[in-house]
Image (cartoon, rainbow, N blue to C red):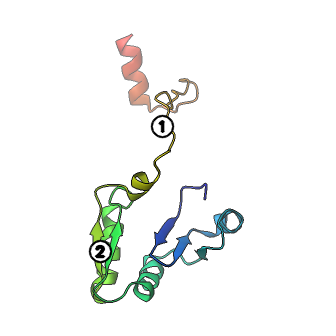
Amino acid sequence: FYIFPGTAVVTQTKAALWTDSRYWVQAERQMDCNWELEKDVSIMSVSEWLISQVPPGGNIGFDPFLFSLKTQEGYAMSLESSNRILKSFPVNLVDQVWKDRPPVPPDNLTRLPDRVIRRSSYTQKDTHTAA
């Protein structure tokens, strides 16, 4: 699925993707039959799905670099009473299995011209003073 805003959850038997309505058609076209598209993007929706798929006492792993602290706390609180344990993995699991992943180009950043960048009057004043 070639978009950024979404949450993917994969268990040993199922996979689901949560994304907002702007991407439903794209998701349905790009995902194969092994994936479920979930259209409620709330933390409770994801948590309820996890509770239905992971047995009590089960661990639920996540990449801590992909979620804000507030979102992590939201998931932990919603799973706490269900006897499921949220655990962060310091190593990206996708990186572990995607062995032939192409390298990120080192020159992937492009500086926009000054005429495109909006600057505050304070920044502009500093630039003119320094020149």
Secondary structure category for the residue under label 1: loop
In the image, residue 110 lies at what x, y percent? 52, 28
Number of marks: 2
Circles 2, 1 touching at the beta carbon (< 8 Å): no
Q: Quadrant of residue 116?
A: top right
Residue toward you, 41 or 102: 102
With respect to residue 125, does 93 lie above or below? below
With respect to residue 82, does 8 lie above or below? above
With respect to residue 83, does 124 lie above or below? above
In the image, residue 67 lies at what x, y percent? 37, 61
Q: Quadrant of the C terminus?
A: top left
The residue at the point 31 percent across, 89 percent down is: 56
Q: Amino acid at mark 2?
A: Leu
Q: Amino acid at mark 1?
A: Pro
Residue toward you, 40 or 127: 40
With respect to residue 111, does 48 lie above or below? below
Q: Which residue is mark 2?
A: 86
Q: Which mark is residue 103?
A: 1
